[in-house]
Amino acid sequence: MRKAKGASRGAVLLGVLALVVTVVGCQDDGRVTAPGGVPRFNQGSGTMRAPLNPELVARGKEIFRHDDFGDAAFWTGALRLNEVVNTLTPVQALGLGLKVDLDALPPGILGSVDLNSPATTRALLSLDAVVGVKARVEGDRITRLGITCALCHSTVDDAAVPGVGHRLDGWPNRDLNVGGIVAASPAIAAGAFKDYLLSWGRGRYDARVNLDGRMDGPTEIPPAYGLADVALETYTGEGPVSYWNAYVAVTQMHGQGTFSDPRLGIHVTPDGPDLVQPKLPALREYQLSLAAPAGDPASAASERGRALFEGKAGCAECHVPPTFTDAPRLHAPAEVPVEATWADRSATKLYRTTPLRGLIHHGPYFHDGSAATLADVVARYDAFKGLGLNVAERADLVAYLRTL
């Protein structure tokens, strides 16, 4: 059981446990701190150290893929999702957006197993082949189930069949129906909260509902690649990479860790050893090693678009190369063409300029996914800022964005 101060400000998570959320600052080594009442970080705290430490990268890769930080107590004990998964067939699991690591499977096994049998699901879990899910299988029962960072922030390349392939770490799983999975828990009663979970849809998640209890809508799961040299992580810029890793590991995954943020008046400590903080430096090192996937090749259209990006359209005023963000500067909601609700629910009440690297691989766009395509993004900014772009200029600007 966790010990917490400020629990009156934490809302019930998933309608089951009264858990409090913390937002934390990070030092450059990835330790979670909040000295003097203010989370501490600086502009360089999100940057990649050169060169990266290969040992830390390798350790961080294992943590990212396979460490559940002791969160099975929640997913098994509280939500009882092991019972749900125990009856799930591989076809149903893939339908929920779960992914299978082809490299963890014996050669040729896909052609010889029944993908409509829950026994096959248990076999895949025994092989540690379901991306982001850790399980212990005893006979015909799943007795322990936890999740890792990779559940939301990895996908596969569909090399075998859709949903089965080689891992793509850092890619947001925009197929994953987190709300649908959690709503299947026998501990979630019918009602408004369950309906809210079911409304999220694929690739979306509300990481604050357990803090404020507001069912105002989820955000798009963000990429975990291309973070080298980016000073602040998250749509609202609460802190750098290790801040978000820590926030998610304890407050969303429900791992066993310690968090404190005086900005929110919240403090959480575990009864047992901290299974999160000691792993943050390695986890951070691995994430900073994940480069954004390449965009389209440059073309005459994209070169014209670059000139517009840096000139008439004014994009580079905030999306400053080479990171394509101006963080640690943050922006009032009135400065950007999105609604203010998500910022209002944050510690900063502001929005961070989103880095643009690897754009074509993780639409839809804006934190709420309200722009389906890059053409929609350009059209919205054109109208919002009165840029006066013609049809050809909009197309050229999109061509450039696709190269980033």
Image (cartoon, rainbow, N blue to C red):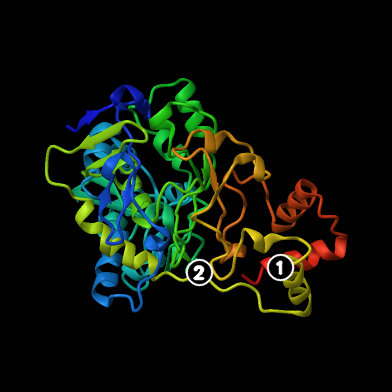
- Graded by Cα atoms within 10 Å as few (under 14), some (14 to 19) or many (20 or more), the crowding at tag 2 reads many
State how far apart marks 2 and 1 are (Cα). Answer: 21 Å
Residue 202 percent location from the top left of the image: 53, 45
| Residue 142 seen in the current view | no
Question: Where does label 1 land, which residue?
Answer: 310
| Residue 153 seen in the current view | yes
* As drawn, 65 above or below 301: above
Look at 22% across and 30% down and name the residue there: 4
Question: Where does label 2 land, which residue?
Answer: 292
Exactly how many numbered labels are in the figure?
Answer: 2
* As drawn, 106 above or below 364: below
| Circle 1: residue type | Glu
Quadrant where the C terminus is found in the figure: bottom right
Residue 91 percent location from the top left of the image: 45, 51
Name the N-terminal-most of marks 2 and 1. Answer: 2
Q: Residue furthest front?
A: 36
Tell me whether the residue at label 2 lies in contact with that at label 1, contact meaning CB atoms closer than 8 angstroms.
Answer: no
| SS state under label 1 | helix
Is residue 43 left or right of 268 when viewed as pictured?
right
